[in-house]
Image (cartoon, rainbow, N blue to C red):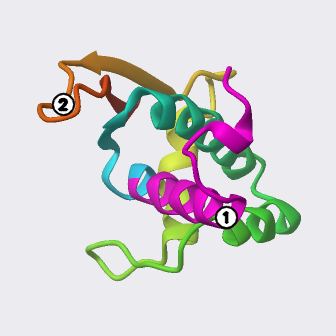
């Protein structure tokens, strides 16, 4: 994998902010489209968050809230509660691999390889 400082050609604060937003959107919508490099990074973070969601302890809730953006679902449920009460219980019998990366055609304009990341 690429050096994290070269991953998006930006500084660490920008990179962490983008990851937080993309992981939150993946949990919220279940599927997002982005470039392949970001997709691989999102997969790592999302799998860790869902594992924390399966634990359900207070410490894991606090750790997840540090990563997720403070948004609400369409029903007005905070994203942290949605992760722990709706998303994580779906994977209680699964030991990992909660996300899938599907390669899609390259983006027109700059020919960046694109991918779709979705929850399994």
Camera-side residue of 88 and 39: 39
Residue 25 falls left or right of residue 54:
left
Split into 4 quadrants, where in the image is the N terminus?
Answer: top right
Residue behind mark 1: 67
Image quarter of residue 50 = top right
Crowding around mark 2 (Cα neighbors within 10 Å: few <14, some 14 to 19, many 20+) is few
Mark 2 falls on what kind of element?
A: loop
- Residue 39 x %, y %: 46, 33
Q: CA distance from mark 1 to mark 2?
A: 28 Å
Residue 55 on image: x %, y %: 78, 48
The mark nearer the N terminus, 1 or 2, is 1
Secondary structure of residue under mark 1: helix
Q: Is residue 18 above or below residue 42?
A: below
Give the image quarter of residue 76: bottom left
Tell me which segment is drawn in magenta: 1-25
Which residue appears farthest toward the left when viewing the image? 108
At x 38%, y 58%, the residue is: 28
Q: Could you tell me which residue is drawn at 32 percent across and 18 percent down?
A: 102
Q: Is residue 87 left or right of residue 84?
A: left
Q: Nearer the viewer, residue 48 or 6?
A: 6
Q: Main secondary structure of the magenta part?
A: helix
Q: Between tags 1 and 2, which lies in front?
A: 2
Q: Is residue 116 above or below residue 57?
A: above
Q: Position of residue 113 (x, y in %)?
A: 31, 23
Q: Which residue is mark 2?
A: 107
Given residues 9 and 1, the one toward you in this image is 9
Quadrant in which the C terminus is drawn: top left
């Amino acid at each position: 994998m690429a050096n994290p400082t070269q991953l998006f050609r930006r500084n660490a604060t920008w990179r962490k902010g983008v990851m937080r937003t993309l992981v939150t959107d993946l949990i919220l919508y279940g599927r997002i489209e982005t470039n392949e490099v970001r997709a691989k990074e999102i997969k790592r973070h999302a799998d860790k968050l869902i594992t924390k969601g399966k634990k359900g302890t207070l410490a894991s809730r606090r750790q997840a809230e540090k990563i997720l953006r403070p948004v609400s679902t369409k029903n007005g449920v905070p994203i942290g509660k949605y992760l722990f009460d709706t998303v994580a219980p779906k994977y209680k019998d699964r030991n990992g691999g909660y996300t899938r990366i599907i390669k899609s055609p390259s983006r027109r304009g700059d020919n960046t390889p694109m991918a779709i990341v979705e929850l399994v």
